[in-house]
Image (tube, grey):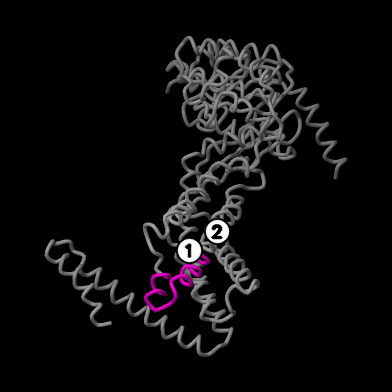
Amino acid sequence: MFICSQITFIINSIHDKLSIWKGGRTLEAAIRFEHVNYSINHLHILKNLSGIFPKGKITTLVGPSGAGKSTVFRLCNGLRSANTGKIFIHGKLITDYHPVDLRRNVGLALQSAPMIDGTVLENLQLPLQLQGKKLPESEAKHLLQLVGLDNSFLHHHANDLSGGQRQKVSIARTLVNRPKILLLDEITSALDRVSQQDIENLILRINEKFGTTILWITHNLQQALDVGDYTWVMMNGELVESGKTSLLESPTDDRVREFVKGDGTN
Amino acid sequence: MTLSLVFVLIPILLSKTLNLGLEKDTVIAVVRSTIQLLAVGFILHFVFNSKNYIYIILMIILMIVAATHNARKKGTSIQGITWKLVVTFIFIEILTQGILLGLQIVPPTAQYIIPISGMMIGNSMVLGILFLNRFTAELKNHQDQTELILSLGGTPKQAVHNQLVSAIKASTIPTIESQKTMGLVQLPGMMSGQIIAGADPVQAVQFQLLVLFLLLTTAVVTAILLGFLSYPTLFNERMQFLKERIQSE
């Protein structure tokens, strides 16, 4: 049994290393979807979804509301499970991971940036506290600096922060687990242009410094073009088009062309 | 006894005069409580005289079934709550009677076992309803917190810890608070009844204190036990939060 699972793992690893994106370039997959279906309450949310998210790159997910983008994230983080199909994370079947290990390796930051009732420090300490460990204050300060917040914020109550500051703390908190994959679900949609720019620069820095694979849901097509290496365009639970982010400038699919014309808001 | 009906006439007359529309419900309440209490009186008379433990056990089973049915009926619930309530009530009964009879605090007779069981199971039922309503409301209102902790690699227990603590506190606080003012604001009904019936007030107080301490234990144990029996139902083996398992009335 163990040998079988090891062989499957090796085959999948080779398969991921040889995953070929449209355009003929060889890319290693951090996440691979194979014929994934997901339904809830008789609602078919993801329909036979297949594709890869390249390792160490920033992939943006765009598409109209209700396309199933957030569901993709929930499946990757293990908060939900696919009804049928397979998802591989770094070549290993997602169901072979212990849920706790999976979630520590695949971090998720949400638009709402939920905070626990407490200070910024307590929020930053949460991921390690869940493991029975303590995040040193110096490390917390270092994280704040990384996301562009002053150390004085450490003892502020999290609920007193502005939207942009909350979002930065949320990202810093996700980074405490040192995830190899970071899922960002519309993290800048409620922010002003300056805060958006700050967060974009921060994510680019994280990607460059740690080689973290980033998946980023955005409704802002200009943002997708600015930060993304690759892009998934999703509609009605299907992956309509995927490839280099430049595909948004000259889409081949009529639906994507129509969507891009509407500036990603339809 | 017949004269006590004067106290029924007062609310009916007031309701009629002020057009409150409470007459029908008042009459139904009076008729029902009279029939139910008389029936219980006759049943208890029979059980006390028979001195047969089978009847005591049957009475306790009946109380547990009625309490479960009532708690299940009220407010929000969690999938599969029925057996959890049954387990809680049985545990409360075994715990309280085990201590009382084991330590020979009260004699093992129907006169003691049945009324005390009624008080404990009744209190446990009210606590159960309070706890479930609060716990499900907390879970619904803080779903983002639950999923945040799970998404950071927390366990289901860690994910609902705050909601559990909040619901346990909220449901037990009324019991604790009412005991703080006991004797100052209100005289407990059982103690008052004993004094009216001619018992020594000090002895009545001693017995009332025993009941109060039992109620305190029942309140805390019910909320904690029900909480720890309930929360695992809300997650699957992949540690995913299944909010659809919280049912509305």
Reply above or below: A259 against B152. Answer: above
Name the residue carrying label 1: B123
Is residue A100 rendered to the left or right of residue B118? Answer: right
Residue at (45%, 86%) from the top-left corner? Answer: B45
Quadrant in the picture for residue B90: bottom right
- Between B114 and A214, the one lying in front of the other is B114
Is residue A17 rendered to the left or right of residue B243? Answer: right
- Between A265 and B203, the one lying in front of the other is B203
Q: Assess disc 2: are there few (<14), some (14-19) or many (≥20) residues with their C-alpha within 10 Å of its C-alpha.
A: many
- Between A84 and A180, the one lying in front of the other is A180
Name the residue carrying label 2: B222
- Percent across and percent down for residue B8 are 23, 73
Residue at (55%, 23%) from the top-left corner? Answer: A217
Q: Assess disc 1: are there few (<14), some (14-19) or many (≥20) residues with their C-alpha within 10 Å of its C-alpha.
A: many
Please report whichever mark, 2 or 1, sits nearer to the chain's N-terminal start.
1
Magenta residue check for A204:
no
Q: CA distance from mark 2 to mark 1?
A: 9 Å
Are labels 2 and 1 assigned to the same chain? Answer: yes
Determine which of the numbered discs, if any, sits on residue A5 in the image.
none
Image quadrant holding the C terminus of chain B, namely bottom left
Q: Which residues are magenta?
A: B190-211
Magenta residue check for B195:
yes
Q: Identity of the amino acid at label 1?
A: Asn
